[in-house]
Image (cartoon, rainbow, N blue to C red):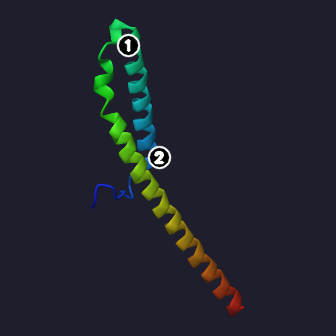
Amino acid sequence: MGMFTPSPTINYDFVSGVYAFFSSVCLLLSVLHFYSPQVEGFYIVLVPFVPSLVWALVVRRRWLKERTAESSKGDAAADDDDNEAKKEK
């Protein structure tokens, strides 16, 4: 499995959402870093979420493409079955 190959058992909408939330907290803390000495340097802890968010969005995009391809294949197969059933009647 490659680094950007999505796993079928993981919901990448949730993963991307969590990474986006913590990336926004990181952004908030980095802005507060310049205005408040009480939170100085706290953003450093959350910095790894930013590249993780980029990774999750790339994998999520591939995951969504695979899901739509699978659903369209399933729809096409169901349509073929319906057409065959109608022909038999």
Point out which mark residue 34 bears.
1
User: Which residue bears the numbered disc 2?
Assistant: 13
Point out which mark residue 83 bears.
none
Q: Are marks 2 and 1 in contact (CB under 8 Å)?
A: no
The picture quadrant where one finds residue 71 is bottom right
Residue at 39 percent across and 53 percent down: it is 59
**Mark nearer the N terminus (2 vs 1):** 2
How far, Cα to Cα, is label 2 from label 1?
32 Å
Could you tell whether 44 is left or right of 18 in the image?
left
Q: Is residue 17 above or below residue 26?
A: below
Residue 75 in percent (x, y) is at 59, 72
Residue at 44 percent across and 36 percent down: it is 20
In which quadrant of the rendered image does the C terminus lie? Answer: bottom right
Amino acid type at circle 1 is: Phe
Is residue 11 visible to the viewer in this orientation of the structure?
no
Q: Is residue 41 above or below residue 1?
A: above
User: Which residue is more in the foreground, 79 or 51?
Assistant: 51
Residue 77 in percent (x, y) is at 56, 78
Q: Around disc 1, counting alpha carbons within 10 Å, would you say few (fewer than 14), some (14 to 19), or many (20 or more)? A: few
